[in-house]
């Protein structure tokens, strides 16, 4: 009985901790769809969006096919802008969710 009470108290503490913060903010639920989310990705223009997608595609082609470097049919410019890929990765990192993990880790100790 004592263990059950401790477990219940820990569960209540966990819920309180989660409700206290503004966690789980990276994924935005898609209305009327179950288990479907969107992720905000900030761009300054359609051109920047086009360049991001282009760099992702070029990197994928080059990584999947090392011979693609010499093929001009894929693109005039085979150079992949690694900075763009790193910026996308940074925007996709779930910062608020990581704060929750830190708080949960502290609560466990």
Image (cartoon, rainbow, N blue to C red):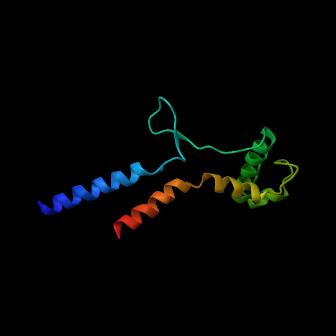
Query: Which image quarter: residue 38?
Result: top right
**Left or right, residue 43 beside residue 7:** right
Question: x, y percentage for residue 32?
Answer: 47, 29
Left/right placement of residue 70 relative to residue 56 reads right
User: Is 64 in front, or is 87?
Assistant: 87
User: Which picture quadrant has residue 63?
Assistant: bottom right
The residue lying at 31 percent from left, 56 percent from top is 13
Residue 76 location, x and y as percent? 88, 49
Residue at 61% x, 52% y: name it.
Answer: 92
Residue 24 rendering spot, x and y as whole percentages: 48, 48
Q: Residue furthest top?
A: 32
Q: Residue 97, image x and y in percent?
A: 49, 55
Which residue lies at the image location 50% right of the left edge and 30% below the top edge? 31
In the rendered image, the residue lying farthest to the front is 20
Along the line of sight, which residue is nearer the eye, 15 or 66? Answer: 15
- Quarter placement of the C terminus: bottom left
Give whichever of 8, 27 is nearer the camera. Answer: 8
Tell me which residue sits at (34%, 66%) in the image: 108
């Amino acid at each position: 009985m004592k263990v059950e009470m401790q477990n219940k108290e820990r569960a209540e503490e966990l819920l309180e901790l989660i409700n206290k913060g503004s966690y789980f903010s990276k994924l935005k639920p898609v209305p009327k769809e179950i288990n479907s989310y969107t992720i905000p990705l900030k761009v300054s223009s359609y051109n920047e969006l086009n360049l991001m997608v282009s760099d992702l595609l070029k990197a994928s082609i080059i990584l999947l096919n090392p011979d693609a470097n010499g093929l001009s049919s894929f693109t005039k410019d085979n150079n992949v802008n690694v900075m763009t890929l790193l910026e996308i990765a940074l925007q996709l990192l779930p910062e608020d969710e990581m704060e929750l993990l830190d708080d949960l880790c502290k609560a466990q100790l």
